[in-house]
């Protein structure tokens, strides 16, 4: 009997193990804090050892302590992505736990997943009992403090904190949370995020001290690259201010609240100055030791002012916060020809240096930041323009760990002044990499190390420009949420990381900033008078990014939330285009930074006429609008925008298509956009593709800018010119993706020629070495070289279709889809066999396209297959989940 029981136990545990439910997410985030959706959504990943396995039902339970607030019962169906909460009304400021189990199509029931949690924020503005408090604006960062006592056992304590400026909150001397740059960068008048923290374990019975250290940050730094007296931030605050409250629930059920109010005191501390572009100055001697611990003597401190800023713009933290992701150690100390002491970290990155050093009292160390050394090997900062990007650390004779707290730098090199050469010990330095803590999603690798470096450079530029908003660059006096850059890079970004929450948060600001006429601003958050709105490719971020998110993550919520913003933009273009449906007016950035022959102006020349780009984007955005309307069940809109799309395409052909199938502008980008956005009648597509191919052959390289580059290889590959796409990939002279790699680039450059072959760096007023836009080629690496793409939203059906090309002997990619890991790895063996190993996640199906000659023997897991379709050079199989190996002799 015992044996039988043991056997059953083993069987049961094996069963349970074979179906493992993990990666629990609420609103696409792991353990988020600050949820105020009445119906947050739940997603999870199931792993199974079986083939062709999927979910047929699930069951979710949500707990508030011991109380079950939702017991979903068995929900039939395969849905495991964004399943909406349907339990008792959620309460503000509460820690919930949840778990889920699933049934697979063999009838196996999984064990319960481990529990995950989420914390709700404040559902109503009226729940803010705290008052805004502020200190007069000076250069020095204010400290604010308040003591409170706790006399009973604490069951739960949640802190809600925000600021005009940036804050770091502490309790009893310890930092609350692990994030930097809170409350983040948003369109502050409309959405000012507050953060929710579980501080239960930080509260002491007895005396406690609540501290806030504040700085100007994005809110009160000059953001923009023109005279600050000319432009204005798009919000009204003029002082550094804070708002915070801690809700304490005692074990006996009673409650208390600690709030910011007029009883708080302020002073200043170690940070003498801090702004986003210019950097931070810290004086160790000015630190008020113990200021944020109980019992500190604050009798010399001043009283803060209570101010009425209201609560209407407050919004909970909506995406992952900025954290220190990793530390990078220095590679070498260089003494430059100019006599500078420079440390090379070997990687262009974003964050801050960290220096452990004691120093003599008053010793002042200045650390400047650069992305490159110039052609003579000297420290190069011209491309930072007016941004000083300088850390100043003043020693007091005690051991210190110096680093910037309320700003960030883009750098590979730092120049150290104020330390003797023999004081510089490389072990005392490291670089802290800071960016929005998005979970990794994808990886790509192939047989060419230069391409692997390119992929790494793309990943690093994504890190560097995902510092709370999708930015253009992280180093110069810009670092702004340029919509065009975000639009062209979003597909690649989404392969690399879990971007749903990050972009969704920013898109809300995009909508908030939209002009009354529907024009989408060039940068989000907007800065008045700096730039404009309504420009082709840039404004289309409004439609393209929500659609990209929907396709990648399969959640319609982003479409619902953005619907009116998307519509406003498309309607704005419709109004400009008028009856003819031809959009050809206005100034535009166009195919920005496209390649120009030497001597041709300054790189701002726009080779592809803007009206061509405009019309293609117009049709595409109308098409996205139509599809979105259809997904959301609005058939009237769907029909209307589909009609507009058709008319826009007809107008395009009337205006720009010649009888012989050529376009009125014979540029790469013109053909690319016409093909990728499906502007041409079927009968001229091949001719158009041939002209693109001819153009590429003629130049021997790409000539595209921001608008054409993301799609050039995709269009070539899809239209029978895969060999040309590979040629462009492997080109390594300017302009190409690998040219920077040959110049020791560790991130993506803004321009094809950001640095010349002799290592001179053209000073053309705008030259970043960390600009992800041209990194948009990453999408092609995943989708075409390795061959993973979504056939249905959220990868519910996947297409695995690699396009091998000359120059590679293997390529492989993995992608964590909403259903789990999909993988495609192909290789060509020495004997010429083509091998494709794939993983199809649980609960999905795949169309697998194995490149093969017609009639070739194709095996699946060693068995010859006969029952496949053959199409366009591929043996096509359909399969359910599992790992499979295909081989072509
Ligand atoms: C530059 C930005 C950005 C681009 C605009 C038009 O200032 O860096 O990359 O979108 O110009």
Image (tube, rainbow, N blue to C red):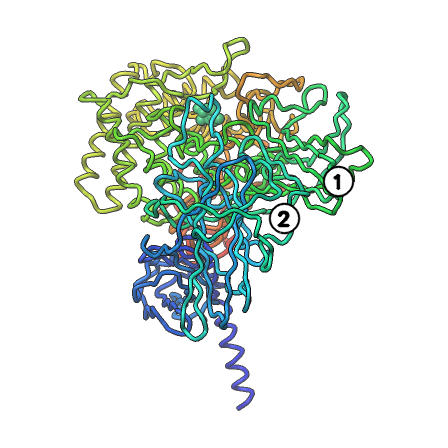
The picture places residue 764, in percent across and down from the top left corner, at 55, 16
Question: Residue 504 in the image: x percent, y percent?
Answer: 38, 44
On the picture, is 417 further left or further right than 703?
right
Label 2: state its secondary structure: loop
Query: In the current view of this chain or complex, which residue is farthest to the front?
Result: 299
716 sits to left or right of 375: left
Residue 658 position, x and y percent, is 30, 14
Is disc 1's CB within 8 Å of ligand 1? no
Q: Residue furthest top?
A: 599
Q: How many residues crowd mark 1 within 10 Å: few (<14), some (14–19), many (20+)?
A: few
Q: Residue at x 45, y 34 (%)?
A: 489
**Front residue (pair 802, 788):** 788
Secondary structure under badge 1? Answer: loop
- Taking the spot 73% from the left edge, 37% from the top edge, the residue there is 362
Q: Is residue 623 visible?
A: yes
- The numbered disc on residue 812 is none
The answer to whether the residues at label 2 and label 1 have Cβ atoms under 8 Å apart is no
**Residue 361: image tag:** 1
């Amino acid at each position: 009997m015992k044996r039988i029981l043991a056997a059953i136990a083993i069987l049961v545990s094996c069963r349970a193990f074979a179906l493992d439910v993990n990666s629990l997410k609420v609103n696409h985030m792991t353990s988020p804090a600050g949820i105020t959706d009445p119906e947050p959504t739940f997603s999870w990943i199931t792993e199974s050892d079986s083939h062709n396995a999927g979910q047929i039902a699930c069951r979710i339970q949500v707990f508030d302590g011991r109380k079950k607030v939702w017991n979903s019962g068995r929900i039939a169906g395969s849905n495991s992505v964004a399943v909406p909460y349907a339990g008792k009304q959620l309460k503000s400021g509460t820690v919930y736990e949840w778990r889920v189990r699933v049934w697979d199509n063999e009838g196996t029931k999984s064990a319960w997943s481990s529990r995950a949690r989420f914390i709700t924020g404040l559902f109503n503005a009226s729940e803010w009992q705290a008052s805004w408090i502020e200190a007069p604006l000076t250069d020095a960062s204010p400290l604010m403090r308040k003591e409170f006592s706790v006399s009973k056992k604490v069951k739960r304590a949640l802190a809600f904190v925000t600021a005009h400026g940036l804050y770091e909150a502490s309790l009893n001397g310890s930092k609350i949370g692990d994030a930097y740059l809170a409350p983040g960068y948003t369109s502050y008048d409309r959405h000012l995020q507050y953060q929710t923290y579980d501080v239960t374990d930080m509260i002491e019975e007895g005396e406690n001290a609540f501290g806030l250290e504040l700085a100007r940050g994005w809110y009160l730094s000059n953001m923009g690259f023109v005279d600050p007296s000319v432009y204005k931030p798009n919000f009204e605050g003029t002082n550094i201010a804070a708002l915070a409250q801690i809700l304490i629930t005692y074990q006996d059920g009673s409650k208390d609240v600690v709030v910011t109010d007029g009883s708080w005191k302020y002073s200043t501390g170690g940070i003498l100055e801090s702004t986003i572009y210019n950097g931070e100055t810290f004086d160790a001697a000015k630190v008020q030791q113990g200021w944020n611990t109980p019992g500190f003597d604050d009798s010399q401190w001043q009283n803060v002012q209570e101010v009425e800023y209201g609560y209407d713009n407050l919004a909970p933290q909506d995406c992952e916060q900025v954290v220190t992701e990793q530390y990078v150690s220095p590679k070498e100390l260089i003494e430059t020809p100019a006599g500078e002491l420079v440390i090379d970290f070997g990687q262009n990155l974003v964050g801050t240096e960290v220096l452990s050093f004691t120093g003599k009292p008053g010793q002042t160390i200045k650390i400047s930041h650069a992305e490159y050394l110039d052609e003579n090997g000297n420290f190069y900062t011209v491309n930072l323009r007016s941004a000083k990007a300088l850390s100043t650390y003043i020693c007091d004779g005690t051991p210190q760990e110096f680093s910037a707290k309320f700003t960030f730098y883009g750098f590979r090199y730092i120049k150290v002044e104020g330390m003797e050469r023999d004081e510089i010990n490389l072990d005392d330095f490291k670089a802290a990499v800071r960016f929005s803590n998005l979970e990794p999603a994808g990886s790509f690798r192939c047989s060419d190390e230069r391409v692997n470096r390119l992929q790494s450079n793309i990943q690093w530029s994504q890190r560097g420009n995902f510092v709370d908003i999708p930015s253009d660059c992280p180093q110069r006096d810009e670092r702004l949420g340029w919509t065009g850059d975000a639009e062209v890079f979003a597909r690649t970004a989404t392969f690399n990381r879990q971007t749903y929450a990050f972009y969704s948060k920013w898109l809300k600001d995009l909508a908030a900033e939209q002009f009354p006429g529907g024009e989408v601003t060039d940068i989000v958050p907007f800065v008045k008078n700096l730039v404009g709105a309504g420009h082709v490719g840039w404004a289309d971020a409004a439609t393209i990014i929500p659609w990209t998110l929907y396709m990648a993550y399969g959640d319609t919520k982003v479409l619902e939330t953005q619907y009116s913003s998307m519509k406003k933009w498309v309607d704005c273009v419709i109004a400009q285009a008028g009856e003819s449906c031809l959009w050809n007016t206005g100034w535009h950035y166009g195919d920005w930074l496209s390649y120009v022959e030497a001597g041709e102006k300054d790189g701002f020349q726009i080779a592809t006429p803007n009206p061509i780009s405009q019309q293609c984007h117009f049709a595409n955005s109308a098409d996205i609008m139509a599809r979105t309307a259809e997904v959301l069940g609005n058939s009237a809109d769907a029909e209307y925008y589909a009609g507009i799309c058709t008319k826009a395409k007809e107008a395009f052909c009337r205006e720009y298509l010649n009888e012989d199938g050529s376009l009125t502008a014979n540029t790469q980008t013109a053909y690319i956009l016409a093909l990728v956005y499906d502007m041409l009648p079927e009968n001229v597509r091949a001719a158009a593709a041939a002209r693109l191919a001819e153009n590429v052959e003629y130049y021997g390289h790409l000539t595209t800018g921001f608008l054409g580059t993301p799609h050039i290889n995709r269009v070539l590959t899809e239209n029978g010119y895969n060999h040309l796409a590979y040629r462009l990939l492997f080109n390594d002279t300017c302009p190409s993706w690998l040219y920077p790699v040959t110049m020791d680039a560790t991130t993506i450059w803004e321009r094809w020629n950001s640095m010349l072959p002799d290592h001179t760096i053209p000073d053309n007023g705008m030259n970043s070495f960390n600009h992800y836009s041209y990194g948009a080629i990453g999408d092609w690496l995943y989708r075409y070289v390795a061959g993973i793409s979504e056939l249905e939203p959220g990868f519910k059906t996947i297409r695995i279709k690699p396009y091998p090309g000359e120059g590679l002997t293997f390529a492989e990619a993995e992608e964590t889809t909403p259903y789990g890991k999909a993988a495609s790895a192909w290789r060509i063996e020495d004997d010429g066999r083509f091998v494709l190993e794939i993983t199809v996640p649980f609960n999905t199906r795949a169309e697998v396209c194995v490149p093969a000659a017609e009639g070739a023997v194709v095996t699946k897991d060693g068995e010859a297959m006969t029952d496949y379709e053959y199409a366009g050079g591929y043996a096509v199989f359909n399969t359910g989940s599992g790992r499979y190996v295909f081989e072509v002799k």
